[in-house]
Image (cartoon, rainbow, N blue to C red):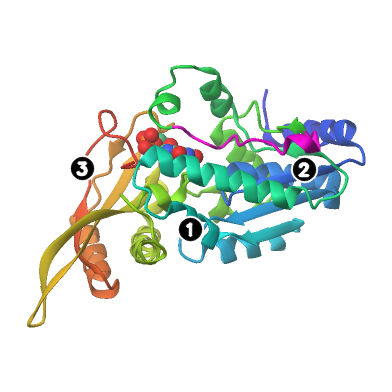
């Protein structure tokens, strides 16, 4: 029968045999899968693993610095690349969701490859692909594969001739979390909600700008920290905030305001294919709404998304 400890033991032995003294590159996303894959490889080949963590400017508030720090604490050999400006530049004027995904995906691959090429003698590219990803990229008509183009599996730097190694290929998400736990990884990292590759880029409806990212990061941090403080984070499968391309009238003191509206989204799901909106307590929603409107400059209205998937999707774009 499957157990995390025996999985770790066999996988580490297999990785050692397969990789020998070869150098391996891995892209970290801050998510559970790539982090657990990195820790397994670290156990097997130590400093022959080089990890690359790209800031696309579309991560959560403080996420790049916080996550980079925790990777370093975990003993990973990691290079952090802040490419935010490049992403913002390339997203200028772009409003179509699929176009945004393509640009973010393409920029990521280019930034990653430029970094990867600097790593001399690298022979392998490691990925945190898990079983549901394998299934999804095989099925021509998988709902999320056709409705929205996911870009987890990016293009490789072809001229580098890297071979692929995917130690989590046969695992489901809960097994990945158990493997991480057995390696004493931070529970907070292992319990993180899923977060889309294009990040806040597809939660800013319409054109993405650095200023809109700032506004959304603030609102999102209030919502997510609120869920944690209220002990609700772990009972929600995924949560986030959407910045809507809508301005509406409000009042602040004696002044009329005309500012942005954000939508809170929290769902329960098992695999993201179907999802129900979460009946968060009114009291909690009231507090989050007040805090966002009082503290986030540029937002004067908060709404809660009560749509399930299908027919709605989890993300708005
Ligand atoms: P939807 O919005 O299709 O989302 O109901 C289902 C799950 O997939 C995530 N998602 C993405 N993940 N690249 C990703 O890596 C994407 O382009 C993308 N679009 C949606 C979404 O956050 C949810 O967990």
Disc 3 designates what residue?
Answer: 306
182 to 222, vertically: above or below: above
Label 2: state its secondary structure: helix
Whether residue 257 is in magenta: the answer is no
Dividing the picture into quadrants, the one containing residue 161 is top right
- Cβ–Cβ under 8 Å for marks 2 and 1: no
Which residue is at 34% across, 53% downward? 207
- The circle on residue 41 is 2
Residue 35 location (% of width, % of height) = 64, 47
Whether residue 152 is in magenta: the answer is yes
Q: CA distance from mark 2 to mark 3?
A: 41 Å
Residue range corresponding to the magenta coloring: 149-162
User: Which label's residue is closer to the chain start, 2 or 3?
Assistant: 2
Name the one closer to the observer, 315 or 248: 248
Which residue is at 66% across, 44% downward? 36
User: Which label's residue is closer to the chain start, 1 or 3?
Assistant: 1
Q: CA distance from mark 2 to mark 1?
A: 35 Å
Disc 1 designates what residue?
Answer: 89
Residue 137 location (% of width, % of height) = 54, 24
Q: Is residue 35 visible?
A: no
- Cβ–Cβ under 8 Å for marks 2 and 3: no
Determine whether, in the image, residue 179 is placed left or right of residue 132: right
């Amino acid at each position: 029968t499957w157990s995390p400890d025996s999985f770790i033991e066999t996988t580490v032995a297999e990785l050692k045999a397969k990789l020998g003294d070869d150098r391996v590159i891995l892209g970290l996303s801050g998510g559970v899968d790539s982090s657990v894959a990195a820790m397994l490889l670290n156990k097997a080949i130590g400093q022959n693993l080089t990890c690359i963590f790209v800031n696309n400017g579309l991560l959560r508030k403080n996420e790049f610095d916080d996550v980079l720090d925790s990777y370093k604490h975990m003993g990973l050999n990691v290079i952090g690349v802040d490419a935010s400006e490049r992403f913002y530049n390339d997203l200028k004027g772009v409003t179509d969701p699929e176009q945004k995904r393509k640009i973010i995906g393409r920029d990521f691959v280019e930034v990653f490859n430029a970094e990867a090429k600097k790593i001399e003698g690298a022979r392998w590219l490691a990925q945190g692909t898990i079983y549901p990803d394998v299934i999804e990229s095989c099925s021509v008509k998988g709902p999320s594969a056709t409705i929205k183009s996911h870009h987890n599996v990016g293009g490789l730097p072809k001229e580098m001739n890297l071979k692929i190694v995917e130690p989590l290929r046969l695992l489901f998400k809960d097994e990945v979390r158990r493997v991480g736990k057995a390696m004493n990884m931070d529970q907070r990292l292992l319990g993180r909600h899923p977060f889309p590759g294009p990040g806040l880029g597809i939660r800013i409806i319409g054109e993405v700008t650095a200023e809109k990212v700032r506004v959304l990061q603030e609102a999102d941090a209030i919502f997510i920290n609120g869920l944690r403080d209220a002990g609700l984070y772990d009972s929600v499968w995924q949560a986030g905030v959407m910045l809507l391309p809508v301005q509406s009238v409000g009042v602040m003191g004696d002044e009329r305001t005309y500012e942005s509206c954000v939508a809170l989204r929290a769902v329960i799901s098992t695999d993201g294919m179907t999802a129900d909106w979460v009946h968060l307590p009114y009291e909690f929603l009231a507090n989050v709404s007040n805090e966002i409107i009082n503290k986030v400059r540029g937002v004067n209205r908060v709404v809660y998304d009560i749509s399930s998937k299908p027919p709605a999707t989890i993300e708005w774009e």
